[in-house]
Image: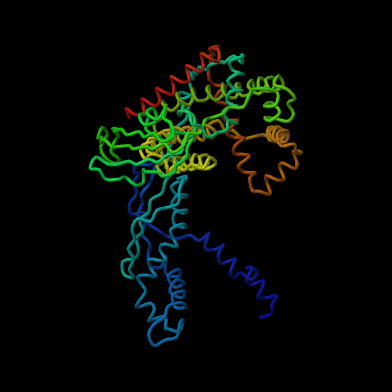
Amino acid sequence: MTELAEKKKNQGGDGSTLQAVLEKKSEVIAYEVVEEEKIPGSRVRFKLKLTEEAIASRLEETINEFSKSIRLPGFRPGKAPKTLVRRQYENAAREETLKRMVARLTELFTADRKYETLSQPYLLAWTSSREAGSTIELAIEVQPEIVINDEILADLKAEAHRVAIDEDYVNQSLETMRERAATFEPTEEAYRAKDGMLLNCTVTSPAGDVISDRCASDYYTVRIEEEMPEAVAAALVGKKKGDKVELDVVEDVEGAPAGTVETVHYAVEVLEVKARVLPTLDDEFAKDVNEAHQSLEDLRKATREGASSSEETRQREEVLGGILSVLRSRLDFDLPRALVENTTQQSVMDTEKRLNQYGISLRQMDESIVRSYAARMREQAKVNVKNALILRALSKHLNVTPTEAQIEESLESLSKRTGRKALAVRAQLEKNKQWDQFIQDLTMKLTNDALIAKAAVSYKDVSFAEFSVIQRKAQEEQAANLRLG
């Protein structure tokens, strides 16, 4: 065979390698549905039966592969007769063959049943013999059935707060900037909330055993209030370098029924206190924030303008959140378990990345705090997943499809934010294979617009101080609900 012919063969030009792969992906495999049931977690379990003819060619391929790699006594590698390989390894070859057929069988089954899959298939069990044929049991996570109709969308109402961009708003925004720019300097003074601290921490069980994964040595943190139990963090306030704090803390027992508690002992030694130092709010600070600002007044003006835009976005999110809360109460469907877990894990990973920027890891934090945080993330993940699935179903119900004009408008907006021409932005999105995601995001934005347009929205004007109180109460109520749950 010439070099050119060999190259064509490898590329599938003569119906070989590539063509064979494409044929296998489109191959129709005859099967019989023996069992099918919906199970919790928006999953479907199904058992398929295949005849020997349905797997014969694939089984032969597997045995051929085994023959090339298996070493049998008395034969050189790859030289053992296929009949001998088949006799000794047919069961393993059958298992491997069925595993390789999982993806294609799932495609055929879900297409036949019109299921929209949300996860890779899980192989639960299999049997295979020349005489009885083969059965394969699988489970898949599917898009739950969500029925959107005029009744579901009737009488949608939402309330939102319209926060005044007053001096309190601007001052708090500037204070937040100062806190982000804070430095921490060693001090002999007593520890105050939000200062930094270097410490040793030993945690022991009720039996007096050291709980090693909750202990820390030479550990520095600027977030004691978030990383330690509330009682421990409170006890450290007012302590100086060299001081020690010992106290018992009642905590939930991990893995035990709700309400099961135990008392663990905390011993904390203060190695060093670092005072939090906020920069002076002056012209120099304004220049440090953005070199385009020549004075504090410039920064205040820019902050006010940015706050107006942020407040519009916040109001929209509050309205949308209120509408989705109504729809969640009207629509009852099983949440895909894996999707909830993946969303939870992603939230925890994002938090870990943010903490790593400060030299902190979730693994260094008190275990009870991490458990509580993970529980909050899981509850929030359930809400986020249900919202996303509702919006996806709503998009189909309303037949939301971006027009060319809407796509161009969105590209122009992205162009202004990036300082690049719209055509260059589109080219970059396509090059990075992000165009489909861009269209999906635009479709979801248009769906949100359509949903908001269907609701009667009422606004309540409040000052920034009033809204801060409202937010704090909402956070406390959410935390209390979580503890009760």
The quarter holding residue 5 reads: bottom right
Q: Position of residue 472 (x, y in %)?
A: 46, 20
Q: Position of residue 190 (x, y in %)?
A: 45, 28
Image point (39%, 82%), residue name: 72
Image point (44%, 54%), residue name: 106
Q: Is residue 299 found left or right of 54 in the rendered image?
A: right
Quadrant placement of the C terminus: top left
Q: Is residue 396 found left or right of 73 in the rendered image?
A: right
Q: How many marks?
A: 0
Quadrant placement of the N terminus: bottom right
Q: Is residue 423 found left or right of 36 in the rendered image?
A: right
Judge whether 212 appears above or below 74 on screen.
above
- Say which of 445 and 284 sits in front: 284
- Say which of 192 and 345 sits in front: 192
- Say which of 421 and 260 sits in front: 260
The quarter holding residue 229 reads: top left
Judge whether 299 appears above or below 224 on screen.
above
Q: Position of residue 131 (x, y in %)?
A: 31, 70
Q: Position of residue 231 (x, y in %)?
A: 35, 29
